[in-house]
Image (cartoon, helix red, strand yellow):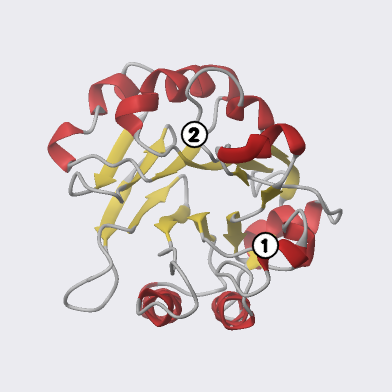
Amino acid sequence: MRIATWNVNSLTARLPRVEEWIRYAEPDVLCLQETKQADGAFPHGAFAALGYETAHHGDGRWNGVAIVSRVGLEGVSTGLAAPDDEQGTRLIAADCGGVRVHSVYVPNGRSLDSEHYPAKLAWLARLKSLLADTTRPDRPVAVLGDFNVAPDDRDVWDPAQFEGMTHVSQPERDALADLQSWGLVDVFRRLYDQDGLFTWWDYRAGSFHKHHGMRIDLILVTEMLAGRATYGLIDRNARKGEKPSDHTPVFVDFTDPSTA
């Protein structure tokens, strides 16, 4: 099973690129973030034409998340456990091919002195609570998406350039580590230990061509899945060309349990 994630930074603007990528990468499950679409505008038909079922959670503003699957799509749920998700449409979950898949778009946090920063930390804590309330770490569970946190200094092009900024602060990294303590493995990092593996590059100052990026798009899975991981890829080619997203797709391949 190939499970992928991609912050597309507007599906309306980039649907042809997503369709092209699906055709050549052939993911079994693709989690999308920042669709920036309302549920009624989501192009279910375009994905159905490629052989995929889809579920979307969006209000047409800055957020929006989706799951695209060709291995089944059942038990769809949206949002966190709190009665109201003041951070917007940032989570959707479904059962796909025997895996409980979560597509997440973690709040940015903006700056360390912003009121949005503690809200980001609280959102990650609530995500951990959601997992504890809805599933177990001894089951096949995947949490994919744009986490807006670089797990460690290997995941940024120059740590000194980010000092005093979000995405690399210790409380954010601690919050991510606490989420993982529920029973999740950063499976791409387990497969590939080197630095310089980035998934996001700023549009400005030629950052992509200079390889001044960050790894903030993560695939976290339970050990039951991590032990079946065979290969992963950050597809930098999808960041090239006309009007790309500032993120690029990431996927990991997992063997079938019967052949593991």
**On screen, residue 91 above or below 125:** above
Residue located 60% across and 56% down the image: 216
| Picture coordinates of residue 36, whole percent (x, y) | 28, 42
Image depth: mark 1 or mark 2 in front = 2
Residue located 39% across and 37% down the image: 68
**On screen, residue 41 above or below 230:** above
Q: Can residue 2 be seen in this view?
A: no
| Picture coordinates of residue 17, whole percent (x, y) | 46, 21
State which quadrant residue 11 falls in.
top left
Query: Is 112 situated left or right of 1 in this image?
Result: left
Residue located 31% across and 36% down the image: 54
Q: Of all residues shown, which one is farthest toward the left?
A: 40
Query: Is 252 situated left or right of 83 in this image?
Result: right
**On screen, residue 220 above or below 72:** below
Q: Can residue 167 be seen in this view?
A: yes
Sequence-first disc among 1 and 2: 1
- Quadrant of the image containing the N terminus: top right
Image disc number at residue 186: 1
Query: Is 86 situated left or right of 99 in this image?
Result: left
Under circle 2, the secondary element is: loop
Residue located 55% across and 25% down the image: 26
Under circle 1, the secondary element is: strand
Neighbours of disc 1 within 10 Å: few (<14), some (14-19), many (20+): some
Residue, disc 2: 245
> Cα distance, mark 1 to mark 2?
23 Å
| Picture coordinates of residue 176, whole percent (x, y) | 57, 74
Amino acid marked by disc 2 = Ser
Q: Of all residues shown, which one is farthest toward the right?
A: 194
Q: Which of 130 and 194 is in front in this view?
A: 194
